[in-house]
Amino acid sequence: MKSLPCTLSALLLFTLAFTPAEYNQHAEQLKKKLPPGFTVVVQPPFVVIGDEPPATVRTRAASTVQWATDHLKKTYFTNDPADILDIFLFKNNASYEKHTKALFNDRPTTPFGYYSQTHKALVMNIETGGGTLVHEIVHPFIHANFPDCPAWFNEGLGSLYEQSAEKDGHIVGLTNWRLPALQDAIKKDSLPSFQSLTSTTPTEFYSKDRGTNYAQARYLCYYLQEKHLLTKFYKQFLENHKDDPTGYQTLQAVLSNPDMKAFQKTWQSYILTLTFP
């Protein structure tokens, strides 16, 4: 067998953070802890666990988890999560509530799903749809590649892909259910400035006007995507975050330094032209 060139060998070692044997060992340990009726599928860098029929769990692992992972890495992320992460796909709300309590002693604060760094797991009520799953897959990749990312961009990027598709080989966000409430807030002139949004602390983002914050962050990312600026913004923000921890200055630069009050009016007018479904 020929030896690999040094650079290619190093790349493979970096990419394959865990061996197939390590994934299989992790899966076998999981099976010992799970109640009957669960299927476990290795889908690097995750292990997918579900209580739907085995064929359905395997299909979700390939068509949603692998698809989202491959496309997110192609567009944004270099590093995989540092740990093998579990994705729990509970078949309905009853299963979701029952098993989050039994397995994690958690009580979900959302009916859709969440990412738990503590348990190294993404926990989903998959009956609500695969969009939340793609959203939550973004978070461990952000944590691995941009650990200082502020909540507004972490959630803005994640929620962008709650409704997503493939275009020219890349993942793109589509309009979704958050749009009508955002348009209503625009009509009521109740949105904060982008400077205020980007400067929110995690507590402020998640506890004060949570729904509007998510929607405004999502559709700012959507606007950047549609103007072919989102990937540029991510890369420049990642590079500049020590000097610009909120991302506001980078946003201004990527938008070619407009009058931000005027830009917000332009953005709001654009959002009011969008439709869903």
Image (cartoon, rainbow, N blue to C red):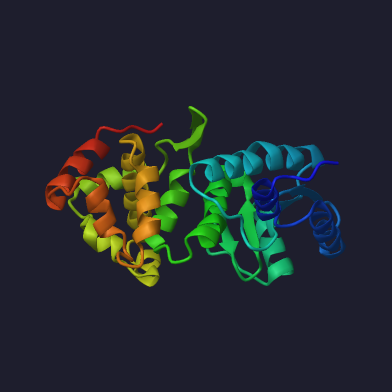
The image shows residue 103, relative to residue 24, as above or below, that is below
Picture residue at 48% right of the left edge, 39% below the top: 163
Residue lying farthest to the top in this orientation:
168
With 116 as the anchor, is 75 left or right in this view?
left
In x, y percent, where is residue 83?
A: 67, 63
With 246 as the anchor, is 64 left or right in this view?
right
Picture residue at 60% right of the left edge, 45% below the top: 69
Camera-nearest residue between 125 and 24? 24
Picture residue at 52% right of the left edge, 50% below the top: 77
In x, y percent, where is residue 232?
A: 36, 45
The image shows residue 41, relative to residue 67, as above or below, that is below
Camera-nearest residue between 17 and 262? 17
With 75 as the anchor, is 236 left or right in this view?
left
Camera-nearest residue between 180 and 236? 236
Q: How many marks?
A: 0
Residue 36 visible at all: yes
The image shows residue 175, relative to residue 254, as above or below, that is above
The image shows residue 240, relative to residue 20, as above or below, that is below
Quarter in which the N terminus is drawn? top right
Picture residue at 25% right of the left edge, 32% below the top: 273
In x, y percent, where is residue 164?
A: 49, 37
Residue 90 visible at all: no
With 82 as the anchor, is 198 left or right in this view?
left
In x, y percent, where is residue 196?
A: 24, 63
